[in-house]
Image (tube, helix red, strand yellow):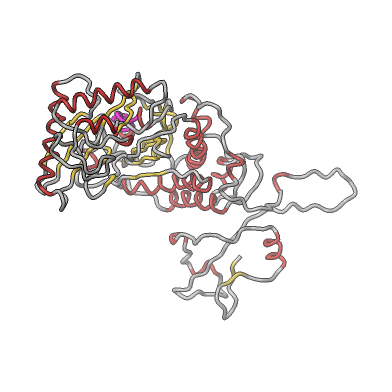
Amino acid sequence: MAGKKEGERTKWLSGGKNVDDLLQGDVDHTYQKMFSWWKLNKKELFGPSFTPADEEVIHVLVDKFEVKRQRVEHSTSDKFDVKRQRVEHSTSLAELWEHSELQLAVLPAPHQLAELLQKPLPFRLTLRDSVVANRVFSPNGPLITCPNLTLWMDHFLVLSVFRRPEATASNTYWQCYYNALLLIPISLWHEKGFLVREHRYLADETGTTSLRKRPDYILQYKGLLLMRGEEMSSLESIAKARAELTTKMCRWNVMLYGDLPYILGYATSGSDLQVVAIERSDGPCRATVILDFNIFEDKAGALKVFYNLAFLLHKMAKLTKRSDACDLVPFVPDENEKRKIVLLDGFIERTIQRTQSGGEMDVERLKSVYDTLQGLDESSPVTHLQTVEKLSVKRDGRLVVELSPIGYLRLPTIDELSEWLRHMLTALKYWHGCGYCHGDIRWRNIVLVPTSGFSYWVLIDMDESRQPNTTTIRWNHRYHGHKLRFQHDLCQL
């Protein structure tokens, strides 16, 4: 409780039986600052005996709790009333995992996910909307206090009541409502030490979002894709948003899903929300609708779904058996002083910068290298080298190359070793046949390309490629100082 004493600044009251009872209940006082739109600016609310100054801030914490009142009697007939049990402990977000962590050996089928995501929370909290709270929590669950979860849920409830957007509001405006819901699982994951990476791409006016097919929302854990989202304004149909879940990233999903049979996705049209399962496929894929509702009309459903998402996605990450993943994050540049790599919708864009040390001559050399690689793909069968989809030199001297396929680093097993060696010798046979040494054979430049039927290894990164006996090795190489020849590639392999 916070109160105002005459002539003093606002502070915690330090006396009184009611305050003592509250503090003995071990109620957490570390409440975060209230949102500015909760401000009470009607002076009549404070009564006739007290009038606040215009700039004076008064914080009032009302903590509703129930105390079981029992008279000590010799009779044992009194029964404990669970609906009036006293709150004795402030529960942290980390402790909520003890209530809700899923005990699954295998992932449920997509048609079983609706029941799991709509499951009532196995405890009770006091929310600002008691009607919503009655539908969110299990009626027989223990009454607990968890200030952080209460804050996030109340935050969404306040937004949904007091900040309803106009019908013509942009999808960027609508994102604040879904950010409020996503804050629930994100907070739970961080308290668990389950450090996911989320990437949101705001709409722009340059056409980049459309041309490069950037997903609106991506959630990853150690390179494993767990969830995607497509968000649109209420002026667009939700069918259009759902369609983008399958047209975007369709060439990545075998690599980024690990061995998961599906990932989760969501599509929005204003306040209309669909939760879907996106199947694993390197061709056309389906998005099976799991749930379809309106987050304003079913606020309790929205809170349940996003709370339960935390535990489902955590279990998905733990059940996958793949230990390696692609280091590239979709649409996030991996950049150093010489080059920039970006994983785009169906290819990797490699941009070679003109450096002070290399300058124009180095760009010309690399253009010749990638021109040769592009020509090789047009005239040869499987080479186990990358394919040049497009090659261009920009006005500022940058060389931009679009490459495919996309793979990730994984060392071969003993059973795979002969196949791995055959693939790499095939790659060198074709590249040496073009009159070039690779110049930089190392584990990070050999990637596994997964497909639905089989997987194969590809040799990548031709930036140090040169014709034999023309260059002294001055880069990070075992044979530094030697004249680069074909034999050096074989020794490195």
Question: Residue farthest to the right?
Answer: 74
Q: Nearer the viewer, residue 492 or 105?
A: 492
Q: Residue at x 24, y 41 (%)?
A: 209
Extreme bottom residue here? Answer: 7
Splitting the image into 4 quarters, where does residue 2 fall? bottom right
User: Which quadrant, please, contains the N terminus?
Assistant: bottom right
Total number of numbered discs in the rendering? 0
Q: Is residue 239 visible?
A: no
> Does residue 423 appear left or right of residue 149 in this picture?
left
From the viewer's perspective, is 402 left or right of 55? left
Q: Which residue is depicted at the point 14% across and 23% down?
A: 378
Q: What stretch is highlighted in magenta?
A: 243-253
Residue 185 versus residue 69 in the image, above or below: above
Residue 388 appears anywhere in the view: yes
Up-down relation of residue 228 to residue 156 (above or below): above
Given residues 138 and 214, the one toward you in this image is: 214
Identify the image quadrant of residue 468: top left
Q: Residue 305: where, in percent of width, then height?
A: 49, 38
Query: Which quadrant: the C terminus?
Result: top left
